[in-house]
Image (cartoon, rainbow, N blue to C red):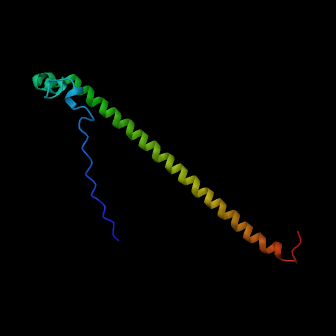
Protein backbone atom coordinates (compact mmCIF):
# COMPACT_ATOMS: atom_id res chain seq x y z
CA UNK A 1 0.00 0.00 0.00
CA UNK A 2 1.41 3.37 -0.99
CA UNK A 3 1.33 6.33 1.32
CA UNK A 4 0.70 9.65 -0.30
CA UNK A 5 2.28 12.57 1.47
CA UNK A 6 0.37 15.79 1.30
CA UNK A 7 2.40 18.58 -0.23
CA UNK A 8 3.91 20.91 2.32
CA UNK A 9 2.96 24.53 1.76
CA UNK A 10 5.91 26.79 0.98
CA UNK A 11 7.27 28.68 3.97
CA UNK A 12 5.73 32.09 4.43
CA UNK A 13 7.97 35.00 3.69
CA UNK A 14 8.87 36.80 6.88
CA UNK A 15 8.02 40.40 6.35
CA UNK A 16 9.54 43.23 8.34
CA UNK A 17 12.14 41.02 9.97
CA UNK A 18 14.81 43.65 9.34
CA UNK A 19 14.04 47.34 9.27
CA UNK A 20 14.21 48.99 5.91
CA UNK A 21 17.19 51.22 5.21
CA UNK A 22 15.04 54.33 5.56
CA UNK A 23 14.32 53.39 9.16
CA UNK A 24 17.93 53.48 10.29
CA UNK A 25 19.68 55.71 7.76
CA UNK A 26 19.18 59.41 8.39
CA UNK A 27 18.00 61.36 5.43
CA UNK A 28 14.98 62.20 3.45
CA UNK A 29 12.12 59.82 4.26
CA UNK A 30 11.81 57.33 1.45
CA UNK A 31 14.78 58.89 -0.30
CA UNK A 32 18.53 58.75 -0.14
CA UNK A 33 20.42 59.08 3.15
CA UNK A 34 21.62 62.52 4.22
CA UNK A 35 25.22 61.94 3.19
CA UNK A 36 24.10 61.11 -0.35
CA UNK A 37 21.86 64.17 -0.64
CA UNK A 38 24.66 66.44 0.58
CA UNK A 39 26.94 65.29 -2.23
CA UNK A 40 24.63 66.82 -4.80
CA UNK A 41 24.51 70.19 -3.04
CA UNK A 42 28.28 70.59 -2.67
CA UNK A 43 29.99 72.73 -5.22
CA UNK A 44 32.59 71.06 -7.44
CA UNK A 45 35.25 73.38 -5.98
CA UNK A 46 34.53 71.97 -2.51
CA UNK A 47 35.41 68.48 -3.75
CA UNK A 48 38.63 69.49 -5.47
CA UNK A 49 41.92 69.23 -3.64
CA UNK A 50 44.19 72.21 -3.48
CA UNK A 51 47.53 72.04 -5.28
CA UNK A 52 49.26 71.73 -1.91
CA UNK A 53 46.99 68.84 -0.89
CA UNK A 54 47.59 67.04 -4.19
CA UNK A 55 51.35 67.47 -3.81
CA UNK A 56 51.14 66.14 -0.25
CA UNK A 57 49.19 63.08 -1.40
CA UNK A 58 51.72 62.46 -4.19
CA UNK A 59 54.61 62.81 -1.73
CA UNK A 60 53.00 60.33 0.67
CA UNK A 61 52.40 57.91 -2.20
CA UNK A 62 56.05 58.12 -3.29
CA UNK A 63 57.17 57.65 0.33
CA UNK A 64 55.01 54.54 0.60
CA UNK A 65 56.36 53.19 -2.67
CA UNK A 66 59.95 53.72 -1.45
CA UNK A 67 59.17 52.01 1.85
CA UNK A 68 57.50 49.15 -0.01
CA UNK A 69 60.55 48.76 -2.25
CA UNK A 70 62.89 48.68 0.77
CA UNK A 71 60.73 46.06 2.47
CA UNK A 72 60.67 43.99 -0.72
CA UNK A 73 64.47 44.18 -1.00
CA UNK A 74 64.84 43.21 2.67
CA UNK A 75 62.46 40.30 2.15
CA UNK A 76 64.39 39.12 -0.91
CA UNK A 77 67.70 39.34 0.98
CA UNK A 78 66.29 37.31 3.88
CA UNK A 79 64.96 34.67 1.47
CA UNK A 80 68.38 34.50 -0.22
CA UNK A 81 70.13 34.07 3.15
CA UNK A 82 67.71 31.34 4.22
CA UNK A 83 68.07 29.44 0.94
CA UNK A 84 71.86 29.71 1.20
CA UNK A 85 71.77 28.33 4.73
CA UNK A 86 69.52 25.44 3.66
CA UNK A 87 71.90 24.58 0.80
CA UNK A 88 74.90 24.69 3.14
CA UNK A 89 73.13 22.44 5.68
CA UNK A 90 72.12 19.97 2.96
CA UNK A 91 75.71 19.91 1.72
CA UNK A 92 77.02 19.32 5.24
CA UNK A 93 74.47 16.54 5.78
CA UNK A 94 75.58 14.81 2.57
CA UNK A 95 79.23 15.07 3.65
CA UNK A 96 78.42 13.45 6.99
CA UNK A 97 76.37 10.71 5.33
CA UNK A 98 79.24 10.03 2.93
CA UNK A 99 81.69 9.82 5.83
CA UNK A 100 79.32 7.41 7.59
CA UNK A 101 79.02 5.22 4.48
CA UNK A 102 82.79 5.14 4.07
CA UNK A 103 83.33 4.34 7.76
CA UNK A 104 80.71 1.57 7.88
CA UNK A 105 82.53 -0.89 5.54
CA UNK A 106 85.78 -0.40 7.47
CA UNK A 107 84.06 -1.18 10.77
CA UNK A 108 82.36 -4.24 9.27
CA UNK A 109 85.72 -5.61 8.05
CA UNK A 110 87.03 -8.04 10.74
CA UNK A 111 90.61 -7.38 9.65
CA UNK A 112 90.18 -3.71 10.55
CA UNK A 113 91.71 -2.83 13.93
CA UNK A 114 91.32 0.65 15.35
Q: Quadrant of residue 37?
A: top left
Residue beneath the point at 48% across and 46% down: 77
Quadrant into which the N terminus falls: bottom left
Residue beneath the point at 69% across and 66% down: 97
Q: Position of residue 64 (x, y in %)?
A: 35, 34
Q: Position of residue 41 (x, y in %)?
A: 10, 22
Q: Position of residue 72 (x, y in %)?
A: 42, 43
Q: Quadrant of residue 53?
A: top left
Q: Is residue 92 left or right of residue 74?
A: right
Residue beneath the point at 74% across and 67% down: 100
Q: Is residue 85 above or below residue 55?
A: below
Quadrant into which the C terminus falls: bottom right
Query: Count of labels shown?
Result: 0
Q: Is residue 79 left or right of residue 109?
A: left
Q: Position of residue 67 (x, y in %)?
A: 39, 36
Q: In front: 2, or 20?
A: 2
The residue positioned farthest toward the front in the image shown: 1
Q: Is residue 5 left or right of residue 36?
A: right
Residue beneath the point at 46% across and 44% down: 75
Q: Is residue 74 above or below residue 35?
A: below
Q: In front: 27, or 101?
A: 27
Amino acid sequence: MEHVVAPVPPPRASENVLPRAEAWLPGVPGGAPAWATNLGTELPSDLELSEEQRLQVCKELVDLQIKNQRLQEQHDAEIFELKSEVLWLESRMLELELQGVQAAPAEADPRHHP
